[in-house]
Amino acid sequence: MHKAGQVMRQAIYNIYIYRIDYLQVFALMRLFQFLLMMPVTTIVLKLMLKVTGYTHITEQNIQSFFAHPFVISMIILLIMIILLFIYYEMGFLFLMAFHQQKGIRYRFLHIWKQLNRKVISFFSVQVLFLVVYIALLLPLASFMLPLTLTQIISLPHFLTDEIMGSLSGRLLYAAVVSIFVIIGIRSILTLPIFIIQPKISIIRSLKQSWRFSRRGLIILLVVFAMLLAGHLLVMLGITVISTLPLYLLERFMPSAALITAGMTLAFLEMVFVVLLSLLQATFSQVMVAITYNTTVLGKLKFTPKYKKRRYKPLSFIILIVFIVLSVMNTISLEKSVYAPNTKIIAHRGYTAGNVENTISGLVSAASAGADLIEVDIQQTADGEFVVFHDRTLRRLTGKNGVIANMTLGELKTLTIHANGFNDKISSLDDFIEVAKALDVALLIELKVHGKETEDVLPKLVEKLKTYKVLDTYYVQSSDLQMMAQLKKLAPNLRVGIVYALNIGPIVETVDFISLEESWITDQLIAELKQQKIDLFVWTLNKDHSLQEFIEKNVNGVITDDPDVALDIRTKQSEQQYFLKRVLNRLQFIF
C-alpha cells in the first residue's frame, strides 16, 4: 500500500506541475480526433458503400460486403489509422511521463520525432501483435483509455443478450472475459515499454510486460483501483456542489432555472472531459512509474515556467467554449420532449416470472400496461403458426427437434421451461384470442426457416382478417422480400423489417424499422422521420438506454422490462425538474 500511495502522489504531482503541457496535448488530440478522424471514417465508409453498390449494410449482405476486395483494403486502412492514432496519443503521454519522472527536459517536437522513428513497425508483421494487444485490452478500455477511439468498440447488445440467456452461455461469457482480462492485465505494459525504449520490438515489449507483471501486478491493480475510486468520488463531489444552485433556484426562483440548467450542464460537461482526460494521463504516469521504478518524490531538477500571457488565450478559449455550450444546452433543454408517445413493446411477452412467448407472459405484459406485445411465430410442418422463437427445441425443452419438422399438435403437448418457470407452447390463434380479450395489440415477428409453404403470407393475412386485427397489428421479419410481398398483399397492415445491424441510410418502403440500439444515430432518427417510417429500438434492458430513446421520442422501444419503461415514460411526461434532466444528459454522455 505504501508503494501504491507513493506512485499515486508522484503521478498527481507531475500532472499538476506540467498541467499546461497536458492541456495542450489533450486539446490537440481531441481536435485531431473530432476534426479529422471522425470525418475520415465517415468518408471511407461512404466510399465503400459507393464502390460496392450497397445502399446500406445489414446482416443479410454483410458477408458479401466484407468479402469485397475494396472493402477489405479500406478496413485494413482504417485499422492502421486507428492504431496510429492510439500509438501517438498514448505515446505522447508515456514519453511525457517518463521525461518528467526522470527530470529530463523535453519538447513536443522531440517527442514527435522519437515516435516517428518507430512508425515503421506498423508496416511489418509486428503490427499483428499490436492488433492482438489492443484487442486484449478492450474489456478494460472503458476504464484504461477513456475518451479514446477504443470507447466505441464493443459487442452489440443483441449478441451478449443471446449469450447471457442461458446458464452455459453466462458461464462461457464469464470465462472468456476473465481470460481476456487476465491476459490483458499481464500485457498492459507492452505499449509504454515499446514506446519508451528506442530499439525494442513489439514482441520483446510483450514478453517484458508478461515477465514484469509477475512481480508488479498487485501494485498495478491496487493503484488502478485507487485511481478509479478517487476519480469517481471527485466527479460525484463536483456534481453535487455544482448542481446545488440549480436545485435551490428551481424551488425558489423558477424563472432563472432554465438558463442556470444550461450553464450547469455546460460546466459539468467541460469538467468531466477534463477529469477523464486527467485520468488517462494519471494512468500513463502510473504505468511508467511502476515499469521503470521512478516513484521517488523530490525536488525537480528544473521547473517548467508558464508565463501569465500563456494563460490568457487559454482562458479566452475556455470562456468561449463555455458560452457556446451553455447556449446550446439551454436551447436543447427548452425543446426537450415532455410528453413522449413512444410505444412500450414487451419483448416476447413479460419474461420476468414467465417463460418467453407464452400466454402467461402475454397476460403479465398486458397487466403491466405494455402498448404492444412482441411475439415470434414460425410455420409448422402442417402449415400452422406456432409461437416460438428458436428453430430447435433444445434451449427451452432440453429435447431434440426442429420446429419446421413438427406439427402444431405435437408442439402444443410439449412443456417449455426457463429460469425456474414452466409453460406450454401455444398457437398464434391462442395468442390473438387472449390478446383481443385483453384489448392489447401484437407485434408479430415472422421467423423464416426456409420450409414455409408457398401460401405462408396469404394464410397469415387471412388469419389476421378473420380475427379483425389487420388494421391494428404489426408484422415484422428480417426477410426483406417477404415483407415487401406482405405489404402488397395487405396495404393496410403495418409491415416492418428487423435489422440486427445497419450502416447507411434506410431506403426500404415499409411502415417501420426494428433496429438494434447499437446502430441508431440522431441522423438516422431524423431521416426516418422525414420518410415517415417508424422506428422501433431493440432490445433495451438498461434504464439509461430506455431513458435515452424515450427522451428522443422514438416510435417504440422493445424491452424485457415493460414496467420500468412505462415508469420512465410516465416520469418524462410529467413536468420534470431541470436538475433531473441535466443529470440524465450527463449519464448519456459519460
Image (tube, rainbow, N blue to C red):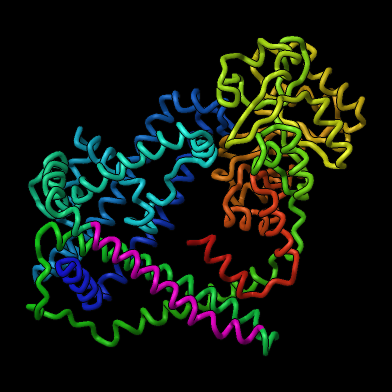
Residue in the image at 55% along x and 33% along y: 57
Residue in the image at 38% along x and 54% along y: 142
- In the picture provided, is 25 more to the left or to the right than 30? left
Residue in the image at 56% along x and 69% along y: 583
Can the viewer see residue 152? yes
- Looking at the picture, how far across and down is residue 293, in whole percent? 9, 62
Closer-to-camera residue (230/315): 230
Closer-to-camera residue (359/543): 359
- In the picture provided, is 211 more to the left or to the right than 335? left
Asked where in the image residue 354 lies, by quadrant, the reply is: top right
The answer to if 236 sits in the magenta stretch is yes
Q: Quadrant of the N terminus?
A: bottom left
- Most prominent secondary structure in the magenta stretch? helix
Farthest residue to the bottom: give it. 252
The answer to if 225 sits in the magenta stretch is yes
- Looking at the picture, how far across and down is residue 515, in whole percent? 63, 40
Which stretch did the figure color magenta?
221-250
Q: Is residue 257 above or below residue 492?
A: below
- Looking at the picture, how far across and down is residue 427, in whole percent? 77, 23
Q: Is residue 35 above or below residue 304?
A: above
Q: Is residue 527 above or below residue 398?
A: below
- Looking at the picture, how far across and down is residue 31, in whole percent? 39, 62
Closer-to-camera residue (291/426): 426
Can the viewer see residue 509? no
